[in-house]
Every structure is written in structure tokens, then in C-alpha cells.
Image: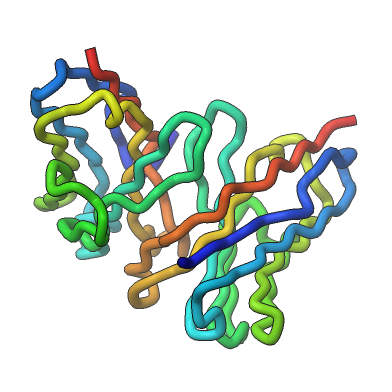
Amino acid sequence: QSVLTQPPSVSGAPGQRVTISCTGSSSNIGAGYNVHWYQQLPGTAPKLLIYDNTNRPSGVPDRFSGSKSGTSASLAITGLQAEDEADYYCQCYEPSLSAYIFGGGTEVSVL
Amino acid sequence: EVQLVESGGGLVQPGGSLRLSCAASGISFSTYWMSWFRQAPGKGLEWVANIKEDGSEKFYVDSVRGRFTISRDNAKNSLFLQMNSLRAEDTAVYYCARDLGSRRQQHSDPWGQGTLVTVSS
């Protein structure tokens, strides 16, 4: 069981908007530690998608956006495309474990 | 272009040892923290360990502390993970990655393609 909680799956039609939640606690997200998001396409290595809660690395489409509030964070994908089918993971630091932690991952399906 | 290439994975018996390597190119390797991550078959991502630019600080997830050792050779732009006393639950694809940002706020980019470690008799 992950310290960060994500829904196992979300789905949407092409062009729709989907959001993925990442629920933590007062010891990690709520304590001010930044949340990062990674995209893992089938059979490939993870790729950084969002860092420091809201920032997109160069080359990441602006259809992807991140937000953070309280003890949770969210990743939004607008204008959903078939190529967005992947697993998405949130990451944060947990001081009680002295470790970086991940959510369990969310599989995004395009209907 | 930044490139990270892992090697050294394979099949090993429980209790055995394996040394993973990660060759970096296209970056000033000695100026970055580096991490190892792993992903068990069909499972999610797990951070394993990371190491400071000069190798003076190292951190581990509880499940590998005392069994795994992270190290680096900045002269050869290489990162290593020495894995001892391997268990079946260590079976995973292992990724190396460059860390960015300040300590405890780090994110990782890019990641290598991964190397598969299978612990089985």
C-alpha cells in the first residue's frame, strides 16, 4: 500500500479532460514537499512530466498541468489524445521514511 | 543529448550478488545527484537509493539498506549499485536517473532504459 494514493485507472474520450489525484498527508505533501509527476508509456522508462507541483519540462505539451492544495496534488490532461495512454505516477519526499515515495500509479485509457 | 545506459542485470540465485552500472553521457556527471529506482514486474515505481555529487552522502530505502551500496566514479561518468544478499522481492527492472533540485525536493530526469534483475533459484 502506497503512502501516496492514486486512483488505479481513469479514462476519457479523445479531446476530453481527465484528472488524476494524488493524496498524501501532513507529513509529506502537506508539509510543503514538492510533488512531481512521471509518465510511463507501455514498455518504456518513466519520463518526467511535471516537477515542483506545476512546472513542465521543456518539450512537454501544455495539455498537461499540475496543481497542489493542502495534502493533495492533481495532474490534469486536457484535449486527451490516444498517445496519452500510459501509467502516471506522482512522487514526493516522506521525511518519516527519509525516502522519496511514489503513488501506486494510474492507468489512463483513451476510449 | 543526455543519455543514461544501465547494464549488469541478469539472473541470480537468492543470496547472491550483482553489480549494476549506469554510464552517463551528455551531462556534467560530477555536478548532479544520481538515483537508482526499481519496478517489480507489473508493479509501480520505487526509489532505491541516491548519492551526492561527490559521493559523500548516500541514502537508501529501508528495504535495501545494509544490502545494497550505491557508488559513483566521476572520472568515468559512471554510477553503480552493488546488490548483495539478494532476495526474490528484489526482482525488478532497475533504472538510474539524474536528480535535479534541492535535497528532499528532488525530481529525476532523464531515466535510463533500465536493466532487469531476476532473483530466482
Q: Residue furthest top?
A: A111
How many circles with numbers are drawn on the protein?
0
As displayed, is residue A17 above or below residue A71? Answer: above
| Towards the viewer: B117 or B26 | B26
Residue B50 pos. (x, y %):
55, 68
Residue at 66% in and 63% down: B22
Is the C terminus of chain A in the top left, top right, bottom left or bottom right quadrant? top left
Residue A64 pos. (x, y %):
17, 44
| Towards the viewer: B77 or B95 | B77
Residue A56 pos. (x, y %):
21, 57
Residue at 42% in and 61% down: B108
Residue B109 pos. (x, y %):
41, 61
B32 horizontally vs A91: left or right:
right
As displayed, is residue B59 above or below residue A78? Answer: below
B94 horizontally vs A17: left or right:
right
Q: Which colour scheme is used?
A: rainbow
